[in-house]
Image (cartoon, rainbow, N blue to C red):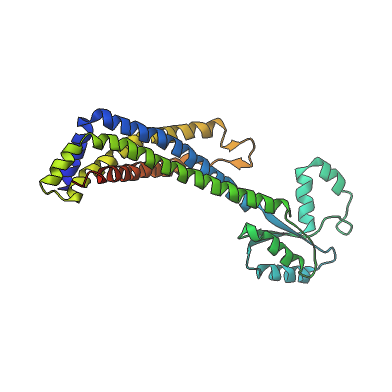
């Protein structure tokens, strides 16, 4: 029965080619917009995660600390629940690194000995939840022998709030576009099914069950959704590859990194195909429902 329904659905698409083409065109246009929104949404989320991953609490220790004091501070930092990982650098290591990175720093710092160096031993702390970075910094600040804690306070909280808002807006746009897509497809497929209401009425009068009548139309909607997603998938795949190569993997600066094309383009394509098939099914099922009553 399923094989016959699939065969009948394919025949129906071919037999009602003009109306089927209208439905496929509607699905294609709306899915292209959805594809652009999905790509933008995923890249915004990726950019947000990259920024959050790079956020670090820098812990400066007092000048007079010894190894025992450093071990004590390390043990207390380790016990803080929001701490994901940390690294330690001595003032000597920081001095060497700065001298290698800049001739200016090299000129300034070479005149300082280890005893009178303005640099301090530091811990660089990564947190699990960026939204709690302020509370974590306060806990670290209260540890004995910690001189200063810096994490970009004030700016970080604003960035986290802004990123959270952007993510919600992006998700909202994608959801809204999917709803609009379903609405447009339902109305377009209604035209296709309306032209065949006599066929549906005859099937209903001879005793066919609702599922027997609806199934070929649902399969037909799946086929229309699948065909309608072909062009958006091609545009998504080749368009994103060209976009990524044109901007060399980042926007404006290395700070805003784009998602690597693979496997992202395949995942995005599967999402688009899935949306096309599902909204095609929903559109057909909703459109045929009104004709099931005699």
User: Who is closer to the viewer here, 175 or 183?
Assistant: 183
Give the residue displayed 82% in from the left and 45% down from the top. Answer: 105
Observer able to see residue 37: yes
Horizontal relation, residue 6 to residue 233: left or right:
left
Quadrant of residue 252 in the image?
Answer: top right
Instruction: Find the residue positioned furthest to the left.
Output: 206
Q: Residue at x 23, y 33 (%)?
A: 195
Does residue 46 show up?
A: no
Q: Is residue 73 above or below residue 206?
A: below
Q: Position of residue 150 (x, y in %)?
A: 75, 56
Is residue 21 depicted above or below 156 in this figure? above
* Rendered view: 134 above or below 31: below
Is 106 placed left or right of 171 in the picture?
A: right
Measuring from the top left, give residue 194's x and y in whole percent.
24, 36
Q: Nearer the viewer, residue 21 or 47?
A: 21
Q: Nearer the viewer, residue 160 or 100?
A: 160
Which quadrant of the structure image shows residue 183? top left
**Count of marks, rendered view:** 0
Q: Is residue 257 left or right of residue 76?
A: left
Closest to the observer, 248 or 270: 270
Residue 246, horizontal then vertical, whole percent: 54, 30
Q: Is residue 124 left or right of residue 285?
A: right
Residue at the top extreme, as displayed? 18
Point out residue 96 in the picture as x, y percentages from the top left corner.
78, 50
Kindly give the residue lying farthest to the front in the view shown. Answer: 294
* Image point (56%, 44%), residue name: 44
């Amino acid at each position: 029965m399923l094989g016959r329904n699939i065969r009948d659905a394919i025949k129906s698409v071919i037999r009602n080619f003009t109306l089927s083409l209208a439905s496929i065109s509607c699905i294609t246009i709306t899915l292209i917009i959805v594809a652009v929104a999905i790509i933008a949404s995923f890249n915004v989320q990726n950019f947000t995660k990259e920024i959050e991953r790079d956020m670090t609490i820098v812990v400066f220790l007092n000048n007079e600390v010894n190894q025992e004091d450093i071990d004590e501070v390390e043990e207390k930092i380790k016990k803080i629940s929001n701490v994901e990982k940390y690294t330690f650098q001595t003032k000597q290591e920081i001095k060497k690194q700065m001298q290698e990175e800049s001739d200016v720093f090299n000129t300034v710092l070479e005149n300082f000995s280890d005893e009178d160096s303005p640099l301090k031993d530091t811990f660089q702390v990564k947190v699990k939840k960026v939204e709690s970075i302020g509370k974590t910094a306060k806990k670290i600040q209260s540890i004995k022998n910690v001189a200063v804690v810096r994490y970009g306070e004030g700016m970080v909280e604003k960035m986290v709030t802004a990123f959270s808002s952007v993510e919600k807006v992006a998700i909202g746009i994608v959801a809204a576009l999917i709803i609009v897509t379903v609405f447009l497809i339902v109305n377009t497929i209604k035209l296709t099914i309306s032209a065949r209401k006599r066929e549906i009425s005859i099937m209903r009068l001879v005793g066919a069950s609702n599922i027997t009548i609806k199934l070929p139309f649902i399969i037909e909607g799946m086929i229309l959704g699948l065909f309608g997603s072909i062009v958006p998938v091609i545009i998504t795949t080749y368009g994103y590859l060209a976009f990524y190569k044109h901007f060399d993997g980042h926007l404006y600066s290395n700070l805003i990194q784009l998602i690597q094309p693979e496997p992202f383009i395949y995942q995005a394509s599967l999402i688009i195909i899935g949306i096309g098939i599902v909204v095609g099914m929903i559109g057909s099922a909703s459109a045929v429902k009104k004709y099931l009553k005699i």
